[in-house]
Image: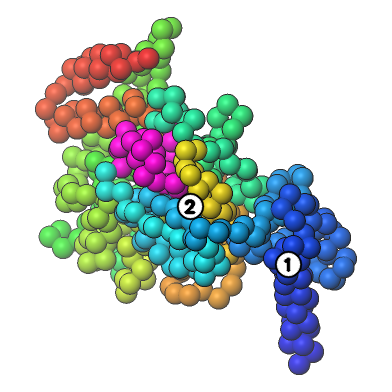
Amino acid sequence: MESRSSRKMFRSRLDDLVNTIRDEITSGQRVPGEFLPSEREFSKQYNLSNLTVRKGLEQLVAEGLIDKIPRVGNKVTGPSARESGPALIRIGYNTSIPREAGIGSLLEQFHELHPDIRVEAIPITNEHPDVIKQFMDNGILDVITLNYNHYRYFLEKGWANIWEPVQSDPDIYPFLTEAYTSGGEQHVMPFIFSPVILCYNREHFLEKSVHEPDGGWRWERLFDNASKLAIPGERLGFYYHFLSANRWSVFLLQRGRSFERDDGGELKLYGTPMMEAFRFCREVQEHFPILSENIANGDSEQLFMQGKVSVMMTSYFHLNFLKDSPIPFDIAPVPHFGDPATLLMSIGLAVNRKSPNKEAAMTLLRYLTSYTAQLEIRRHTYSLPALKPAAEWVGEEAGYRPSRFSLFREIVPSYRFFTEMNIGEIEMRMIEKEVRLYWAGLESEETFCARLERLLSAIAP
């Protein structure tokens, strides 16, 4: 009884803090531009820890009433009076975002908090950066989800100035914030992320008396155990979407490490460790049938759910295809050749600098990256929220969660963006397009290298 009473008093003090500040802002006692007292002062006044005070202030950030400025303080920004009715903002998003982040539910919650802002959600079916650029230039979108690859494309094209700079949040993983920062400005606010991982059927391992994978597995061991797990004519021991750059890049990162260039900056391939990595990818593909057509549709995950695959290379994003699966699955780091490395994927949020409702657009961005929204993503999806306190939250789960879900924290040192291979997004797109002839056995290694080096030389700035 005493413990329950203490929790109630604690909750009451936190509510008093949040409600008091909210009332002071909405009544005009605290005006836009004014800074709130420090978190330490609130901590003493309400007998709460600094961390609890910070979480309470996060709620006011999500409501658009204050803005957290790192290393400075919390500044009052609202409420904003709109005499002409609700502001309309349009957010464009990848068609996978509803599955990966539950964007529909998040926007419903945002509308409840901000009835003066109307959000129109627009799924983007053609995600080519050139098309996205047209949307932004024509004022069709105010906010957009932008993955790291597309962001790099914009940088390489010199288009970063179309995004409104954002204020970095110290609670977001630094390796994500740094990825979206260039020239001293952060252009994109990290939203969700995922490394490439293994996902496996625990029952298959038990059935064949095979030990479950761990961080010490090398590829040789995986292939050896995959042969034990496989049942001819019934299931594959190991599988992944072979033609997806978000899968075979893992082999390039581990085996090739970095693309070599000559004194003029042009890419060299023939006779390099990176060519050995491409050769390894080809050898792997020769041992497995190509069954999946479209990675976006989760073809590999569908095969896994049908019991046709024992182990697959996937991501936290794609684990969302397994939400209703009865299979007792778990996850593990991808194997390696002695030096662990895996591809890191990230999706962020960017605001159009030309937006006529920039303030409202920023309010939406702040909400989607607030603790409230990010915790919603953590609890109701398998995707990893960019906000560290939300990603590492521990509590009662809303549904099935693999026992090794939190391994993402332990493998952070192995995270690599594709750009760490000394290559740009435009070059990566060219390689992804041209390597398939070589992998299909339709041209020799020498021909492939010469052709790709020539094509890349032609697109060099």
Name the one closer to the observer, 290 or 374. Answer: 374
Instruction: Give the structural element (helix, strand or loop) at label 1.
Output: loop
* Residue position marked by numbered label 2 in the rendering: 192
Label 2 and label 1: CA atoms lie apart by 36 Å
Say few, some or many: other residues with alpha carbon within 10 Å of mark 2 (under 14 / 14 to 19 / 20 or more).
many
User: Where residue 105 sits: x, y (%)?
Assistant: 43, 67
Does 247 appear in magenta?
A: no
> Is residue 175 visible in the rendered structure shown here?
no
Does 146 appear in magenta?
A: yes
Quarter of the image for residue 305 reads bottom left
Colouring style: rainbow
Instruction: Give the structural element (helix, strand or loop) at label 2.
Output: strand
| Magenta residues (range) | 127-152
User: Where residue 265 sits: x, y (%)?
Assistant: 41, 12
User: Where residue 158 sits: x, y (%)?
Assistant: 44, 24
* The C terminus lies in quadrant: top left
User: Where residue 38 sits: x, y (%)?
Assistant: 82, 55
Q: Is residue 319 above or below residue 422?
A: below
* Residue position marked by numbered label 1 in the rendering: 27
* The N terminus lies in quadrant: bottom right
Please report whichever mark, 2 or 1, sits nearer to the chain's N-terminal start.
1
Q: Is residue 327 left or right of residue 3?
A: left
